[in-house]
Image: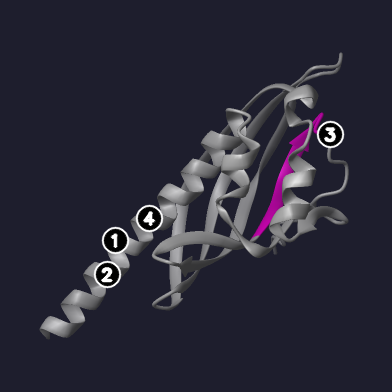
Amino acid sequence: MSTEATASGVDQLLAAEEIRRLIYDYAFHLDMNHPEELADLFVDDCEVVYGPGFGAEGKDAYLKTLDGIGDFFAATSHHVSNVVVDFDGDDSATARSVLYAWHRYNRKRPDGHVWGQYHDELVRVDGRWRFKRRELRAAGTTDFHVKSMISLGRA
């Protein structure tokens, strides 16, 4: 094995860990109701897709979708695991991760649950990994406020 191949492998391991941290930071900031910090995890021309017709194009539009989440949710808890990262180049990658999310609403209604996956396109800008595109795909939901979800596409 060449020294160059070893260095490239180490670089990808470090980048994969930075991407995992980005994914975990997303869950943390969403659960803590930190909309500014959440939006900062995305590039300016990002695309966020939570369901058909529900999401945002661009960081400013995404920040607007986050407006009022503290009033809508009393609490949320997003659990992300099984993160798989594939590199398209030194500064671009895709990732998929498994999600379970619990939502307690401020208005009187049952708690909402989502089981699914995130499918992400990521880019490194100025040395920091950011979401370029984030899509939520659902395996199932119970009492969730988003009525139309993108399917996992299970065969």
Q: Are marks 1 and 4 in contact (CB under 8 Å)?
A: yes
Lateral position of residue 20 relative to residue 97, left or right: left
Q: Earlier in the sequence, mark 3 or mark 1?
A: 1
Q: Write down the residue under mark 2.
A: 11
First reached walking from the N terminus: tag 3 or tag 2: 2
- Work out how far the residue at label 3 is from the one at label 1, CA to CA, in angstroms: 37 Å
Mark 3 secondary-structure assignment? loop
Task: Indicate how the structure is coloured in the image.
Answer: one colour
Circle 4 SS class: helix
Most common SS among magenta residues: strand
Name the residue: 18% across, 75% down. Answer: 7
Q: Residues within 10 Å of mark 3 (few under 14, many from 20)?
A: some
Q: Which kind of residue does numbered mark 2 sit on?
A: Asp
Taking depth in this image into account, of 66 and 28 the one nearest to the observer is 66
Q: Residues within 10 Å of mark 4 (few under 14, many from 20)?
A: some
Quadrant position of the N terminus in the picture: bottom left
**Magenta highlight on residue 76:** no
**In 3D space, how far apart are the residues under numbered discs 2 and 4 (Cα atoms)?**
11 Å
Mark 1–mark 2 CB contact (< 8 Å): yes
Any part of residue 1 in sight: no
**Inter-mark Cα distance, 1 to 2:** 5 Å
Left or right: residue 68 versus residue 14 is right
**What residue is shown with label 3?**
145
* Residue found at x 46% / y 61%: 129
Q: Which residue is mark 1?
A: 14
Picture layout, residue 47 above or below residue 97: below
Q: Which residues are magenta?
A: 134-144
